Amino acid sequence: MILEIATLTIQSGQQAAFEAGVAQAIPVFLRAKGCRGLQLQRCIEDPLSYRLHVQWDTLENHTVEFRTSPDFQVWRGLVGQYFSSAPQVVHSEQVLSSH
Amino acid sequence: MILEIATLTIQSGQQAAFEAGVAQAIPVFLRAKGCRGLQLQRCIEDPLSYRLHVQWDTLENHTVEFRTSPDFQVWRGLVGQYFSSAPQVVHSEQVLSSH
């Protein structure tokens, strides 16, 4: 399992519209090959900064298959207009868990 | 529930020792007031960069109570020597989840 960690910085005043766009996008992610779920986190220290966490079976499910699919344009169409800068995206593998 | 997101950058060659230190620290976190769990994530694009995710009941459980407790020094004693720069820590609240 791969965790996509996207840091998304939103224009001031557009947070509610952005959050509604992500809510609308949940089924877009869930129908993508290898997508296991997502969570949207809002940063307490900077309410214009969000972390979108998406669980994927493989790195390529996100970086190749989703990004080249028509649904990537659907996703960007729902939220891209609210970004104040380009998303910063990294991926990680879980090393340890307390559960 | 609050998510602590700590970006931890580790000295080259010290990853295994760092990961072992975090494994040893799991009970230190789990006995802290308000701590619900933690996960260690290793960044695929930069294997010296980790994300430590810790779930807390409240922000103060981490920023006040844990950081001023003797166990914070135990935690830093287990892993601090492997950092190559100061940890970058933010906190977030979950806005949306697909689950």
Image (spheres, coloured by chain):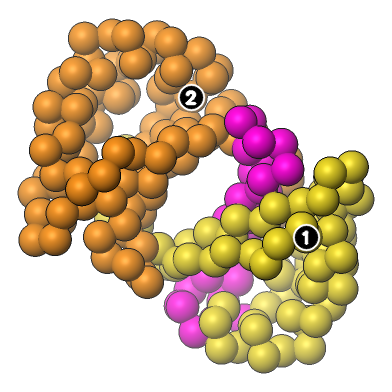
Chain colours: A orange, B yellow
- Which corner quadrant holds the C terminus of chain B? top left
Please provide the residue range marked out in magenta: B33-61
Q: Nearer the viewer, residue A71 or B88?
A: B88
Chain name for mark 2: A
Q: In the rendered image, which quarter is residue A15 located in?
A: bottom left
Residue at x 84% of width, y 77% of height: B74
For residue B46, above or below residue B28: above
The residue pinned by badge 1 equals B83
Residue B29 in view here: yes
- Please give the label number shown on residue A64: none
Q: CA distance from mark 1 to mark 2?
A: 29 Å
The residue pinned by badge 2 equals A56
Q: In the rendered image, which quarter is residue B54 located in?
A: bottom right
Residue at x 20% of width, y 48% of height: A84
Q: Is residue A54 left or right of residue B19?
A: left
Is residue B38 magenta-colored? yes
Residue at x 48% of width, y 73% of height: B57
Q: Nearer the viewer, mark 1 or mark 2?
A: 1
Q: In the rendered image, which quarter is residue A48 located in?
A: bottom left
Residue at x 36% of width, y 63% of height: A43
For residue B35, above or below residue B61: above
Dot 2: element? strand
Measuring from the top left, give residue A76's x and y in whole percent: 19, 27
Total number of numbered discs in the rendering: 2
**Amino acid found under the numbered disc labelled 2:** Trp
Measuring from the top left, give residue A32's x and y in whole percent: 33, 15
